Image (cartoon, helix red, strand yellow):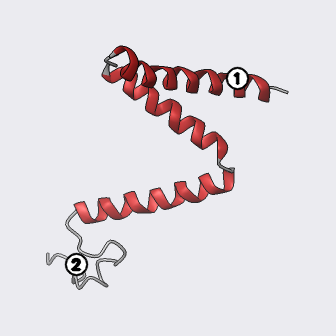
């Protein structure tokens, strides 16, 4: 029911971005950083709209695993998938009282 309105919105956004890119070459238009950011958002949203939801979910899971691995490495761990015991870190001994 609302697909036509959504597609019209994407078409309008993409046409604005393309017109602006052409204006850079034809009229020496200098876009601001905010314009560049908005253009990137429009392009990503348009591309994401074309991808089936199952592919987006798969991509999201891979991204989360990658970010978790990066955080693990940033914390000083060598192997992003090894547990501390697998990495050779001895278990903490209870403190003597």
Tell me the SS state at disc 1: helix
Question: Which residue is situated farthest in the front direction here?
Answer: 26
Q: In this view, does 66 lie above or below 90?
A: above
Could you tell me residue 85's position as x and y percent?
Answer: 30, 83
Res. 20 image quadrant: top left
> Dot 2 surroundings within 10 Å: few (below 14), some, or many (20 or more)?
few
Q: Say which residue appears at 63% left-offset and 27% top-offset.
A: 10
> Dot 1 surroundings within 10 Å: few (below 14), some, or many (20 or more)?
few
Res. 31 image quadrant: top left
Disc 2: which residue? 92
Q: Say which residue appears at 49% left-offset and 24% top-offset.
A: 17
Could you tell me residue 56's position as x and y percent?
Answer: 60, 52
Q: Say which residue appears at 54% left-offset and 57% top-offset.
A: 59
Which circle marks residue 45 in the picture? Answer: none
Disc 1: which residue? 8
Foreground: 94 or 31?
A: 31
Foreground: 56 or 76?
A: 56
Residue 96 horizontal side relative to residue 63, left or right: left
Ranked by sequence position, the earlier of labels 1 and 2 is 1
**Spatial distance from mark 1 to mark 2, Cα to Cα?**
61 Å
Q: Is residue 72 above or below residue 2?
A: below
Could you tell me residue 9's position as x and y percent?
Answer: 65, 22
Q: In this view, does 86 lie above or below 30?
A: below
Could you tell me residue 74's position as x and y percent?
Answer: 23, 60
Res. 26 image quadrant: top left
Quarter occupied by the C terminus: bottom left
């Amino acid at each position: 029911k609302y697909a036509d309105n959504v597609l019209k919105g994407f078409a309008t956004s993409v046409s604005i971005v393309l017109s602006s890119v052409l204006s850079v070459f034809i009229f020496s238009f200098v876009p601001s950083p905010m314009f560049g950011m908005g253009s990137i958002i429009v392009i990503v949203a348009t591309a994401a709209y074309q991808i089936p939801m199952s592919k987006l979910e798969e991509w999201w899971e891979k991204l989360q695993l990658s970010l978790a691995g990066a955080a693990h490495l940033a914390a000083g761990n060598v192997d992003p998938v090894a547990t501390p015991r697998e990495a050779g870190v001895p278990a903490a001994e209870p403190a003597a009282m």
